[in-house]
Every structure is written in C-alpha cells, then in structure tokens.
Amino acid sequence: MDYYNRYKDFLINGKQTVVPFLTIPSRVTDQQYLYRSGQSRLDKISFEKYGTPYFGWLILAANPMYGGLEQNIPDGTILIIPYPLTAALQDYKSSLDTHIFYYGR
C-alpha cells in the first residue's frame, strides 16, 4: 500500500496551509474497535487493521465526535474503523474534493 499524503493538496507556493478536518460517511463494511486509554493508540490500531501505522487520522475522520484529537477519546469507547482502507480513502478524497470546490484551499 502506498502512503497517501493528505497534506500535498494544501501546499501552496511551497507553504503548508491548514488541512481541514473532514468526516467520512459510515459504510456497512466498517469495523469496530474497543479503545482502551493507556493501551490503545491510533497508529497501532491503524497497523492492526490496515497493515500500516499511517491512517490514525482516517479513523478520527470516521469518529468526528472526538474533535480530531486522540486524547479526547474516552476509555471504553467503541471506535468505528473505516473499512476497507481503499474505499475509506476514496470517501475521504471525495469529501476533500467537495470541500475544495466550496471553500478553496
């Protein structure tokens, strides 16, 4: 799996601009994960579910009630894990395209 660089669309004239927090819709194929404070970490969950530690941000996009911050996830929370990864990334890219269409970069 190639790394998806979600920051590349927000480089303007070599300077990084703000990357918006986007949500992705749920799918019937999504999985669930019991989050344990002090034991669970989004990079570890990403590695377990996707085989790569780089998609914790995508898990947060599927769980917008925590405001995009892992430290806001309470112990014992059931997280939605967007699955499969390819479809979840397509959903993210679609949300990103819509955001850029309406608000620009």
Image: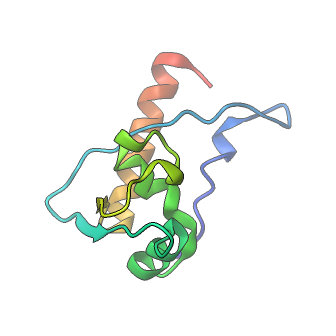
Q: Would you identify the image quadrant in which residue 22 lies?
A: top left
29 with respect to 61 (left or right): left
Q: Position of residue 20 (x, y in %)?
A: 55, 33
19 with respect to 1 (left or right): right
- Answer above or below: position of 57 versus 46: above
In what quadrant of the picture does the C terminus appear? top right
Q: Residue at x 22, y 50 (%)?
A: 26
Q: Position of residue 34 (x, y in %)?
A: 29, 70
> Please, which residue is most extreme toward the left here?
28
11 with respect to 56 (left or right): right
Q: Residue at x 60, y 49 (%)?
A: 6
Question: In this view of the protein, which residue sits in the foreground, 56 or 96?
Answer: 56
Question: In this view of the protein, which residue sits in the foreground, 19 or 70?
Answer: 70
7 with respect to 102 (left or right): right
Q: Would you identify the image quadrant in which residue 75 lies?
A: bottom left
Q: Residue at x 37, y 41 (%)?
A: 64
Q: Residue at x 24, y 68 (%)?
A: 31
Q: Position of residue 103 (x, y in %)?
A: 52, 17
